[in-house]
Amino acid sequence: MKAAAFEYARASSIEEACALLREHGDGARLIAGGQSLAPMMAMRLARPTWLVDINDVPDLQYIRVEGERLLAGACTRQRALERDARAIRLVPLLSQALQWVGHIQTRNRGTAGGSLAHADPSAELPLAACVLDAEVSVRSTRGRRALRAGDLFTGPMTTALAAGELIEEIAWPIWREDRVGSAFTEVSIRHGDFALVAAAAQVALDGEARCLRASFGVGGADATPVAFPELAQTLAGARLEDAIISTIAERAAAALDPGEDLHASAHYRRHLAKVLAERALLEARDRAIARRAGQIRQ
Amino acid sequence: MTPRGHRISVEVNGHMHGGEVPARLTLVDWLRDELHLSGTHVGCEHGICGACSVLFDGEAVRSCLMFAVQADGHRVTTVEGLSGEDGRPGELQDAFCETHALQCGYCTPGMLIAAHALLRGNPHPTEAEIREAIGGNLCRCTGYQQIVEAIEHAAAKLAERGAR
């Protein structure tokens, strides 16, 4: 359980990290928190010839609000994002999702960008990114480009990142409606384990509790996390009665192509997808309604 | 080709330690095999069991998921650093003894680091918060109940000392 030998370089800037990735070619890997890469190296599932360490790049660790977006540097620790007061207030789904990620000790080290780049289809942060339609900024020696989260994930542990590219920043849209509620839920063997299936939802309601917009998605039940913008769009203008939510969740689950392993059959994963998507939407709706009640009491 | 060694300089339990390490050497192996700080235990070596937990720049992390070279210029506290200057156990460690919170002792250093990090940020944790804080630490003797009691007991003792 020891990693194979490799060379190591610590980058002090984004430019230097990009240059090192380019210089050392295909065998080079970035290491951020290392909470997925280090175990893969210990088990020899990954054998990079070079590790480019971006943990000490100051320009990759920040949380700030710019207009309608909360921006997080790629190397921002998951625990920092989970506890950041602005993130909790403006993008509550983030903190809700992060509470399911590993354990406190792994979130202290694990990073936002690392979780996206690892692209585990059952991971919580990629699902939250798809549901919120986060924008991922990517850098290389060739320049900068931006990807929507839904376009970043192309398969299990596989992204649209090209050789030599690194994730620089993740921009999380802020929903500014008065009555926004969100929820994240999952089923795993033990808390902190990988999710068998996870679901996330966010809804905005008007003063009459009609849906202004909604977004939801499911992780762990397909090759990538999947958001359902078309189905969510059909909720706009409707009162989110339990029956409507149940129907939408059912249709979402039917559209998925879950795999199976010794922990769960495809049939069970599809069942979980329906139940959890429904639960997440109901909880998000109830939170949005509670927020309205709270405001009336004030 | 033999990969080159890296010079590192790390503050461990308040003292500076230097050395030359191959990049693949994990932080826990460096602490144990080079610095002979064998209080930190090596369990699963892939980030599941929590036995190797240390404080890195003050935050609890798994030292099997870091390479020693990454600690260059940083600050590490191991379980040895939790005791007083005279090497006697601190309140938290005493509480583990008093409530029989260790059986084989393998998970204990990780539990102590997790509990220490919890109590530092949250001196009056609920039982649920304690369970959350040690959720990433496996005890194969399954003595979790006594470990939770130890942390509750330590919190009470520390509060009493603070009130005095």
Image (spheres, coloured by chain):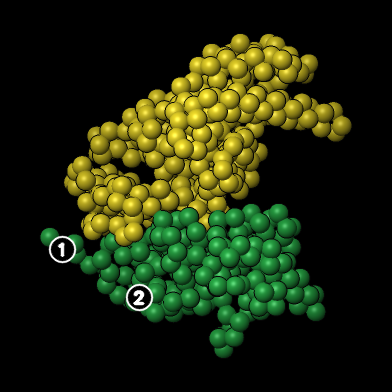
Q: Residue at x 43, y 37 (%)?
A: A120
Chain A as rendered: colour: yellow
Residue under circle 1? B2
Q: Position of residue A211 (x, y in %)?
A: 69, 16
Graded by Cα atoms within 10 Å as few (under 14), some (14 to 19) or many (20 or more), the crowding at tag 2 reads few
Q: Position of residue A147 (x, y in %)?
A: 39, 27
Q: Position of residue A228 (x, y in %)?
A: 53, 19
Q: Is residue B118 left or right of residue A292?
A: left
* Amino acid type, label 2: Asp
Residue under circle 2? B33
Q: Residue at x 27, y 62 (%)?
A: B23
Which of the two labelled residues, at mark 1 and mark 2, occupies the earlier sequence position?
1
| Quarter of the image where the N terminus of chain B is located | bottom left
Q: Position of residue A44 (x, y in %)?
A: 29, 51
Answer yes or no: is residue B58 visible: no
- Kindly identify which chain the residue marked by label 2 belongs to: B
Q: Residue at x 50, y 42 (%)?
A: A194
Q: In the picture, which chain is green? A: B
Answer yes or no: is residue A44 visible: yes
Give the structural element (helix, strand or loop) at label 2.
helix
Front one among A35 and A146:
A35
B44 over A59 or under it: above or below: below
Give the structural element (helix, strand or loop) at label 1.
loop
Q: Residue at x 31, y 60 (%)?
A: A2
Graded by Cα atoms within 10 Å as few (under 14), some (14 to 19) or many (20 or more), the crowding at tag 1 reads few
B82 over A294 or under it: above or below: below
Query: Are the residues flagged by discs 1 and 2 in contact, CB closer than 8 Å?
Result: no
The disc placed on residue B41 is none
Front one among A81 and A245:
A245
* Amino acid type, label 1: Thr
Q: CA distance from mark 1 to mark 2?
A: 21 Å
